[in-house]
Image: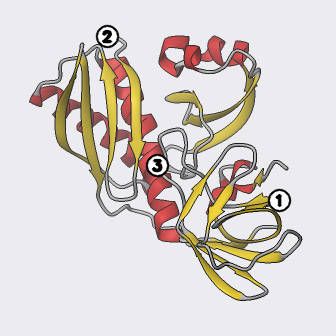
Amino acid sequence: MATEQLYLRSIESGYYTDFHATVTSVEDGKVGLNRTLFYPLGGGQNWDTGSLVGPNGSLTVNEVRGRGTILHSVGENHQLEIGDEVKGSIDWERRHAHMRMHTAQHLVSGVVYEAFNGARTVGNQIHDDRSRIDFNPISLTEEMLEQIAFETNLLIDADHKVTDSTMTRTEVNAEMPPERTNMDLLPASISQLRVVKIGDNLDLCPCAGTHVQRLAEIGHIQIIGKKSKGKGTQRITYELEIPQIIPNPKKEIL
């Protein structure tokens, strides 16, 4: 049974922390639910952590993986059974850090594409303390790194809104060049895409990750490392400063 991914309802849904669900599968130390707010590892973004409270008490969720059925790792002694009702709660600080980092990645990728001859994002890893992006083809100098941080931070200071919608492949390609959105990496069978948009087309990209609603929540980026990955690919690592705006999470999503 496929799990309803509650955070995908809208950008706003990513701000909720609590939900109720029913256990639909049990596999060793992992449980599947009919619905979840927990983000599973995927798309370069790390998983959420938190807890599930069931008939036998509270369980720590330390890993979340899967497509279709989302599996929550809670340990071998969970005692949950199919049909049990549980209350889930995600770690808000970790979730919001991922939201900030992921939206920052979209911004940086857009800045690099526009500033440096269409250099593409060919990989990324989103963590709560630091993140990285791989670009190709490019050879980054210190001056280029300073330009990337400067231009990205100007956009963050402008506090553009972040929105999401559903678009077709044709609609996305009419808005942005396919090589910028990495449309060729998406399975051809997917025709309806969840798209995240920053401002008035500052960036538009198919994405199933969690994101902030406004750029002032990100905080300035600091590029802390550069590394060659061969064949014209270079990796940058970045951290985020404390943001101008720190939102309060919402409670239970219905």
Residue 134 versus residue 64 in the image, above or below: above
- How dense is the environment of label 1, judged by Cα within 10 Å: few (below 14), some, or many (20 and up)? some
- Locate residue 253 relative to residue 117 in the image: left or right: right
Q: Position of residue 235 (x, y in %)?
A: 26, 31
- Could you tell me which secondary element the residue under label 1 belongs to? loop
In the drawing, what numbered circle is on residue 231?
Answer: none
- Residue drawn 48% across and 18% down? 180
Residue 50 versus residue 10 in the image, above or below: below
Q: Which residue is mark 2?
A: 117
Amino acid type, mark 1: Asn
Going by the picture, which residue comes out furthest to the right?
A: 83
Q: Are marks 2 and 1 in contact (CB under 8 Å)?
A: no
Looking at the rendered image, the disc whose residue lies closer to the viewer, 1 or 3, is: 1
Q: Report, in whole angstroms, how far the alpha carbon at label 1 lies from the one at label 3.
A: 32 Å
Q: Which residue is mark 3?
A: 215
Quadrant position of residue 171: top right
Q: Position of residue 78 (x, y in %)?
A: 67, 78
